[in-house]
């Protein structure tokens, strides 16, 4: 079975601070990894994804994530957050041979102006 | 990017009635759609995988007779909550897989309130 852990449940930052949200997964095979964002009152949007190749992937709005296979991690980063980044962030994994995503519990990011 | 719509966006119904939620992929065909449920301040929990032209695959603990799923075409899947009860009140989200990379695109969700 696959599982995803997001250790930071609630993060509060000031504008311009750097962000790193942790994501660890458990799965015995090859995985596809995703970060989704859910702004208040809106639906889930894909931030970035990793399927293969360069383990450092860049997404929209200045976000990036690094896949570290040895650590089973896919942490999300942004060098300088903005107030508009206030949202819920979900890490998700899909193991090969499985079609559905398994989501982490989410991290609520609050950016203070 | 691909667009997935859901209808209705919110619904209030009386206990014991049935509610149908539609999920459409607007600009791509999806042989597979997924239905999730999200409780307040919690993550998405997969309910079932909807397969075009065949029966849905339900996750453990999800009652297939209560949550009826139909995937009649490559662009439409429906979730019917039968004999709804207050504990069924939740936010229901669908997603559709598309493209070679199998990225899932999510609908805006349907908020169900059962009185």
Image: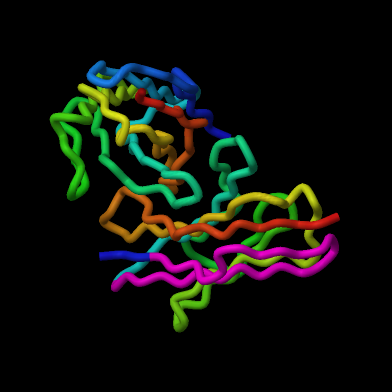
| Camera-nearest residue between B36 and A13 | A13
Q: Residue at the bottom extreme?
A: A70
Residue furthest out toward the front: B115
Name the residue: 46% across, 72% down: A24
In the displayed structure, B70 sits above or below B42; it is above
On the picture, is B88 further left or further right than B113? left
Expressed as whole percent of the image width and height from the top left, the position of residue B50 reads 26, 34
Please say whether residue A49 is visible from this viewpoint: no
Is residue B19 at least partly visible in the picture? yes
Instruction: Tell me what residue is drawn at x 26 percent, y 25 percent.
Output: B84
- Check residue B23 for magenta coloring: no
Residue nearer the viewer, B19 or A68: B19
Q: From the viewer's perspective, is residue A62 above or below residue B55?
A: below
Q: Quadrant of the rendered structure where residue B39 is?
A: top left
Q: Nearer the viewer, residue A67 or B113?
A: B113
- Measuring 39% from the left and 39% from the top, which residue is drawn there? B97
Q: Is residue B111 left or right of residue B81?
A: right
Count how many numbered circles sit on residues in the image.
Answer: 0
Give, as a single range, the part of the protein colored magenta: A4-28
Task: Please identify the quarter of the rendering in which residue A4 is found.
Answer: bottom left
Q: Where's the N terminus of chain B, which quadrant?
A: top right
Q: Position of residue A86 (x, y in %)?
A: 71, 51
Q: Is residue A48 above or below residue B16?
A: below
Q: Quadrant of the C terminus of chain B?
A: top left
Q: How is the image coloured?
A: rainbow
Task: Give x and y (percent) for residue B43.
Answer: 44, 52
* Residue B55 in the figure: left or right of residue B104: left
Residue B102 pos. (x, y %): 41, 46
Question: Which residue is rendered at x = 32% and y = 46% of the image?
Answer: B46
């Amino acid at each position: 079975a696959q599982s995803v852990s997001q250790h930071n449940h609630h993060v509060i930052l000031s504008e311009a601070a750097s962000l790193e949200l942790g994501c660890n997964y458990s799965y015995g095979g090859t995985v596809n990894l995703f970060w989704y964002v859910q702004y208040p009152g809106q639906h889930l949007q894909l931030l970035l994804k990793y399927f293969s190749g360069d383990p450092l992937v860049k997404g929209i709005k200045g976000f990036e994530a690094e896949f570290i296979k040895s650590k089973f991690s896919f942490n999300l980063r942004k060098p300088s957050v903005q107030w508009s980044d206030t949202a819920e962030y979900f890490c998700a994994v899909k193991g090969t041979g499985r079609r559905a995503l398994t989501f982490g519990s989410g991290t609520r990011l609050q950016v203070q102006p | 990017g691909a667009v997935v719509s859901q209808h209705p966006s919110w619904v209030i119904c009386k206990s014991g009635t049935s509610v149908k939620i539609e999920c459409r992929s607007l600009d791509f065909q999806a042989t597979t759609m997924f239905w999730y449920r999200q409780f307040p301040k919690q993550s998405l929990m997969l309910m079932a995988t909807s397969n075009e032209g065949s029966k849905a695959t339900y996750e453990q603990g999800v009652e297939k007779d209560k949550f009826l799923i139909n995937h009649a075409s490559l662009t439409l899947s429906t979730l019917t909550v039968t004999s709804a009860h207050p504990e069924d009140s939740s936010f229901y989200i669908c997603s559709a897989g598309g493209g070679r990379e199998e990225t899932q695109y999510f609908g805006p969700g349907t908020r169900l309130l059962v009185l």
